[in-house]
Amino acid sequence: MKVCEAIAHWCADIETPFVAGIPGNGILEIIDRLSIDTSVPFVLTRHEQGAAMMAYSYAFQTGKPAVVVASKAPGATNLAIGVMGAYVESLPMLVISAQVSNDHERLEAFEEIDLASFFEPITKWSVQANNPDRVLGLLNEAYRRTLSGRPGPVHVAIPYNFMQHELDGYTPPAVPAATAGIGDGLLATAGAMLRGAQRPLIIAGGGVPFGNQDDVLAVAESLDAPIVASWLRKPVRDDHPNLVGMAGIGGSPAARHAVHDADVVLALGCRFSEQMTEHYRMQFAPDARIIHVDLDPAVIGRVYPVEIGVSGNLRDVLPVLRASVEGAPTSSQRTSWLCGLRDEHATYRATLSDAHTADGLVGGREVVRELRSVLPDDARLVLDSGNYLHWAEQYFPVSSAGQFHYPTSGTMGFGIPGAIGAKIANPDAFVCALVGDGGFAMTMGELETAMRIGVAVLVVIVNNSTLGHIRMRQDANFGGRRIGVDFTQQHFVHVPRAFGAFSAEASTPEELHTALKDAISSVLEGRSAVVDVHVTDELAAGPLVKWWDA
């Protein structure tokens, strides 16, 4: 068996849903053997970043890695933005890049750079194979590392002259060992601390597995505890009465008061990021006792001192914690505190409901509202990066965890390839990408990918012909001087037609409603659709409103 054949079999054995990238020297042999020896599809993307973003999104939805491939330096370095995003969000991904022949290494050969070093800062592990007989062993180790402990992307560079080398045998990849179970003793202590609290708070972060939403809610209900979501995560359904909003930039007043006043805090799968803590301004009460549970021991106590730190998989921890607080005695003080936060949050939500763009025009707020009203309840929303994301958090409630994905890496251009990855992960779900005009233009070529591979997604563009988030900061901090943020008027309605997708344009409430209904019908019939919505200059105020100081 040749190295290229072994890699193809390896891709099948790890059950990657696809191998994505752009063909080039050094990976052509892998792609060829995939088609001959396996049923794993090769997905041609229009840019390598699209391949990495698809895998990034697939991992967010499933917790499983997909494989992306790229040729030497130009192709491999194009993967970087998607690989970086997966690294920031602790998501598994398997990156295979070609490298120049090892006979020519360090001679400044064509397209040669040190790819192992290039990827090292944005992966859990990056290595170059220097012996063809070690390629399979390195890939098996990469598979183990991408899923073990705190997940993350891994990278293996393979000199292209290794592909035809004959191996003595094939060693199949081993499924990475499951995280060891958590002893009940430490969690029993944490449960007792929570049962004795008068103002217990649960902070639910991005590390809470989607399948454990009910465990989080059950703990909150047993304790009469409010739940605060970490920044731009929706780890539990929005309609649960114990949820009092999001912490951080653009967060809710009730979430701020819950953090400020809690006497015992249970932080679940939360890194206390800069955005969530509003540039690390957020502070707990001086006597607050913090229980921090995370898969990665390195983040426990890094930002805030903790009384109990539990390093473990939340899939194992949450059921034990749930059992430890069941039947907690009622407390009038706990109930009163929760009721007060609920009332405050209800007032905040009412204020949001009463807000409208002036003169009945369409702003980003109205786009999200209309989307939520016409999409199926279980639709999955994939965001790009931009100012409108704050409206998405406020006006797109979800009925279960996993329906809402903002790439907290801040990755522009994520929306379309992210939606494709989410649809591959959830073929029966309706998937919508909400993107700005800047992000759309970065990866709009991937619409052709969606059409070609038969993955139907809806793309909605919030089109204000500007980089709104940056413009807002220029207006606030540079005397209103806008430099490098404004585009000419753009009519993207023409772009999808080039690829055979449905397209429509809207600038009034009536046009928006009709366009979205027609686009949804197109997607349900199996044809991707784009709705280009021309909105007003109004921007979401969240980024400039001081959440912690307000």
Image (tube, rainbow, N blue to C red):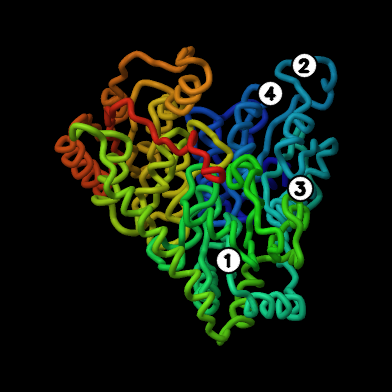
The residue lying at 59 percent from left, 70 percent from top is 200
What amino acid is labelled 3 in the image? Leu
Tell me if residue 55 can be seen. Answer: no
Q: Nearer the viewer, mark 1 or mark 3?
A: 1
- Residue at mark 2: 109
Q: Which mark is residue 201?
A: 1
Q: CA distance from mark 1 to mark 2?
A: 58 Å
Marks 3 and 1: in contact by CB < 8 Å?
no
Query: Which amino acid type is shown beneath numbered disc 1?
Result: Leu
Q: Earlier in the sequence, mark 1 or mark 3?
A: 3
- Please say if the residues under marks 2 and 3 sit with CB atoms less than 8 Å apart: no
Residue pictured at 36% horizontal, 56% vertical: 347
From the image, tell me which residue sits under label 4.
Answer: 73
Which residue lies under the disc numbered 3?
Answer: 136
SS for callout 1: strand
The image shows residue 479 at horizontal and vertical percentages of 48, 15
